[in-house]
Amino acid sequence: MQQHTRRKPMTGGGKATRLPTICDLPVPPAPPGANFSDAQQQRWDELFASAVAWLWGEAELGLVAAYVHLEAQLFDGSGTAATIREIKSLADSLGLSPASRARMGYEIGDDDGQ
């Protein structure tokens, strides 16, 4: 089985490196101790199918797991202002927002929107 490892994304003619719109690598297992609920596992799977997953290697698995757990805390009402700050920080580090991808030099899709 192919591991989820960082791969060089496709490049377009512009300044930013273009990422494919989906990541078709196998979804890696969650780190030991993550103990995801079904909803959290679904979110993990969604994140690793997203375009930005091309940017993540083994080193980012813990960060993605932390993001999934913190996001769940926010949605179940147990999150705090500190939770929100940490989610924003992790999202920025992982390239989950358009602004963070732009700072990292990446964009999603090609000129045809794919």
Image (cartoon, rainbow, N blue to C red):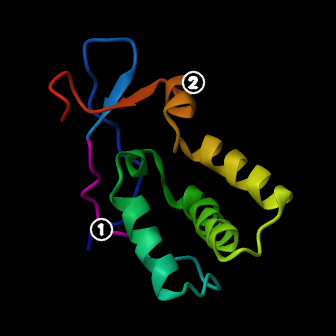
Measure the C-alpha gap from mark 1 to mark 2: 27 Å
Please state the horizontal and vertical placement of residue 56, each as a whole percent of the image.
48, 51
Please state the horizontal and vertical placement of residue 6, each as a whole percent of the image.
42, 49
Q: Find the magenta span and give its range.
A: 21-28
Q: Is residue 5 left or right of residue 33?
A: left
Please state the horizontal and vertical placement of residue 27, each as a whole percent of the image.
36, 69
Which amino acid, by three-letter code, is at mark 2?
Arg
Please state the horizontal and vertical placement of residue 44, each as a whole percent of the image.
46, 69
12 inside magenta stretch: no
Q: Is residue 82 left or right of residue 106?
A: right
Q: Confirm whether residue 86 shows in the render.
A: yes
Above or below, 28 against 99 in this view is below
Front-most of 84 and 10? 84
Which amino acid, by three-letter code, is at mark 1?
Pro
Res 107 label:
none
Q: Residues within 10 Å of mark 1 (few under 14, many from 20)?
A: some
Q: Confirm whether residue 28 shows in the render.
A: no
Q: Is residue 70 left or right of residue 112?
A: right
Q: Secondary structure at mark 1?
A: loop
Q: Residue at x 65, y 85 (%)?
A: 33
The residue that mark 1 highlights is 26
Q: Residue at x 57, y 24 (%)?
A: 103
Front-most of 53 and 73? 73
The residue that mark 2 highlights is 103
Q: Quadrant of the C terminus?
A: top left
Above or below, 112 against 25 in this view is above
Front-most of 81 and 2? 81
